Image (cartoon, coloured by chain):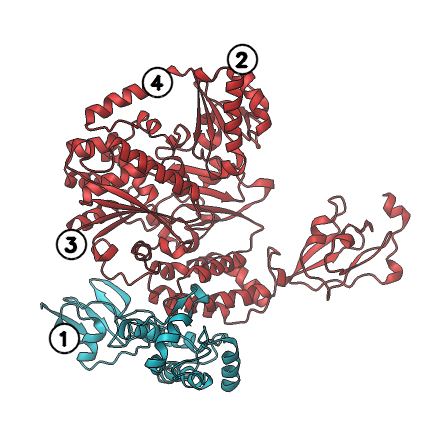
Amino acid sequence: MAKKIRSPQELLQFRKKVVALKEAAKTRIIVSGGTCCLAKGSKRIFELFREELDRQNIADGVELISSGCHGFCENEVIVVILPEEICYMRVRAEDVKEIVSRSIIKKEIIERLLYKDPLTGEQFIKEGEIPFYKHQSQIVFGNNRFIDPKNIEDYIARGGYEALVKALQTMTPEEVITEVKKANIRGRGGGGFPAGSKWETTRNAPNNPKYVVVNCDEGDPGAYMDRALMEGNPHSVLEGLIISGYAIGAREGFIYIRQEYPLATENTLHAINQAREYGFLGENILGSTFNFDVEVHRGAGAFVTGESSALMSAIEGRVGQPRPKYIRTAVSGIWGKPSNLNNVETLANVPLVINKGAEWYSSIGTENSKGTKIFSLVGSVNNTGLVEVPMGTTIREIVYDIGGGIPGGRHFKAVQIGGPSGGCIPKQFLDMPIDFDEFSKIGAMMGSGGMIVMDEGTCMVDVARYFLDFLSDESCGKCVPCREGLRQLRKILMRIVRGDGEEGDIVLLEELSEVISAASLCALGQTAANPVLTALKYFREEFLAHINEKRCPTRVCQGLVSYFIQPDRCQGCMACLKNCPVGAIDGGKGLVHVIIQDKCAKCGICFEVCPDRYRAVEKLSGEPVPVPPIPSDREISPRRVAR
Amino acid sequence: MKKVSLTIDGKEINVEEQTTLLQAARAAGIQIPTLCHDDRLAPHGSCRLCSVEITSGKKARIVASCVYPAANGLVVETKSPRVVKIRKVILELLQASSPKGRVEELGRIYGTSTDKFEKELTFCILCGLCVRYCSEVKKADALGFIGRGIEKQVVFFPEIALKSCPACEGQCFSLCPTGILPNKFARSVPSFGRSQPTVFPVRLWDEENFLNLTRNIE
């Protein structure tokens, strides 16, 4: 049982002790252990390291840490050896013995496991030198790679809970709010509302008690920044929450974690217990008169509970659906009491502001968007993972400098930002800086930080349809514009991608979108038409091609695509015939193969399996399928085969 | 109670604080259409038919008048072109799933086109009047919502319904604004109203009823 820390001095002494202990270990091995790392077998790798260190009898001088996500998710499992800062990527179980005997004992570098830039072929030893990391500034996310999320001492050793001490000891609650307001932290959940103002409204609201809540109901497709923070560094969020509780005058906090994040839940619960043991939660925190405790509330699988009033209904134990918010939740939230809700990343920024001051913090970023933002960079990009950049960084820098560009020499088409409430930002805005207001100017939204890169092979009508599918399922279904409006928007889009689009559909989409945006009850509905509206704004010609020419320019929409075998390229290899699941291909050895169009299910398997050296299967859209050769012309002459 | 003063459709109106815009307008003789509202029940704000346009400062926005509280200096338009357009589209959306009853009546008033959207008949507009009446007035909670998004439905909970529905004799049905469902439904469940119903359909539009109703309407 750990000793309760009762004063700032005790914390200082304790930190010194922990740091000294850490320095005593000659070598540290850090194995990444976020959810994606676990999927790649990092738990087993961690255990193997432990066994191997024991076997070689060197466990005493080596500290082994299972950290959170390092961000470079496509190269998991990542193993970092300190103090040499050797970083190995894509480590597998069979590499462990070699790493211990060569890199730990003999201090050699195993080149095979180093990161190799796929574009230049250059190899890097240190994690920080890799282009993916070099162009980032990880002020919030950076600690993830050094900390064992299950060990509060790791967090304390890196200056953890210093901000809480500073706030409790030297600042009044009002001063904390002033500092947060001066730093101008804007809500990282997507809305961009200034956190300080929200805190102030909650503090000044007449009712008591007051509640503070963390929103970890991250649900945007392709976004997982909050998960990585909550899993990898839960104490940083917890510290931010405790500070917000102090500033607002709350005694109780809630952390709402979605059901799909078991590791985040586990690590958060663990962190809360440790914080209680060490006296960062409970009565008279750090010897002050401030009392505060936290409860974890698990979500039940609904996207809409990320909306503040729905989330609060869920905490109350009712159905998680939004209610009219004409009186703000900051004034009347959980059980009608003033409740302040902040996103995970927003709160993780708070200790930084308190420690280093609003002036330092607001020196980062643009005029109206301060600090950094974490994005999950996914989709058609070479380096996928979590990236943290200062506000003001351009999309081009993220996609090309950090992301390493688009794979396979394809071209950039758009980047989807802001999840289902956001939109697709086209090429002409590549140099636009990351900024809350800039994004909303062009009809998109910062959102929580999902960034899906799309290349030229992406059909934007199909993307809009995908998001509408998602939203019509995830809407709570309470209000008519959202439920029925999305149902019909989806039907119209399905019609268009199927090839049954009619003239007037675009006008109908626009009219409906306008009503959904204006009349829906909550933010989900009010922003639900954004994917359609931005697609119509920037990629209108694709909609027109689908509707008027019955052509999908990217040949993605199944209903508008036909497959055809080029007679002069077919070598009669029978690969397509054997693999066709519906028996729609007629042919035989030495014969030109023919697709029977009436039978074809348009699955595209023939296109995939036709050998690269022949490329005989073609995808067509918007043009008639050529008539196949008559039987007597279908024999492939030996000369042609030989060639 | 404190009084507040606001303008609705150019009329200056004084009401008590906490009054909703809908109540304020109705008290002043200004009619606003509703589908999910009932004076006996807490406002739900789900049909959005009572949408009005409010201006405070420079910004104009659409709010649901049944839940929006009256405030000093508020300027409210209940029949602006934007409001009328929103109501019309809402009714057209509803007509795709429930083309009869009150929806049809209001549709006629607003000049809706009945075939603007693809039909998907469910005969329920999920206004929640039956659910809320059962819960708030009868305190029985014999029905409720299940599912979400476009899959959302109203269902009876058989265990509760078996006990509490017979005594109440389907008061909830008379509230239903969709016109066709309640009468047909009441007749199609012969055991209804007796002391011991033997079978109680779980869903308002269980498959057999649904098919019958569809046949009747087309």
Image point (56%, 16%), residue name: A101
Q: Which residue is mark 1?
A: B12
Classify mark 4: helix, strand or loop.
Answer: helix
Q: Which residue is mark 4?
A: A21
Q: Which residue is mark 2?
A: A106
Residue situated in front as seen by the camera: B197 or A435: B197
Chain shaded cyan: B
Q: Are marks 4 and 1 in contact (CB under 8 Å)?
A: no
Q: Are marks 1 and 2 on the same chain?
A: no
| Mark 3 chain | A
- Kind of residue indicated by mark 1: Glu
- Kind of residue indicated by mark 4: Leu
Q: Colour of chain A?
A: red
Classify mark 3: helix, strand or loop.
Answer: loop
Image point (87%, 43%), residue name: A642
What is the CA distance from the residue labelled 3 to the residue labelled 4?
Answer: 47 Å
Q: Quadrant of the C terminus of chain A?
A: top right
What is the CA distance from the residue labelled 2 to the residue labelled 4?
Answer: 24 Å
Classify mark 2: helix, strand or loop.
Answer: loop
Q: Are marks 1 and 2 in contact (CB under 8 Å)?
A: no
State the image coordinates of residue A95 (x, y, percent, origin top left).
58, 25
Q: Are marks 1 and 3 in contact (CB under 8 Å)?
A: no
Q: Are marks 4 and 1 on the same chain?
A: no
Classify mark 1: helix, strand or loop.
Answer: strand
Image point (35%, 35%), residue name: A140
Q: Are marks 1 and 3 on the same chain?
A: no
- Kind of residue indicated by mark 2: Lys
Residue A241 in the image: above or below residue B27: above
What is the CA distance from the residue labelled 1 to the residue labelled 2?
Answer: 87 Å
In which image quadrant can residue B99 be found? bottom left
Label annotation for residue A207: 3
| Mark 1 chain | B
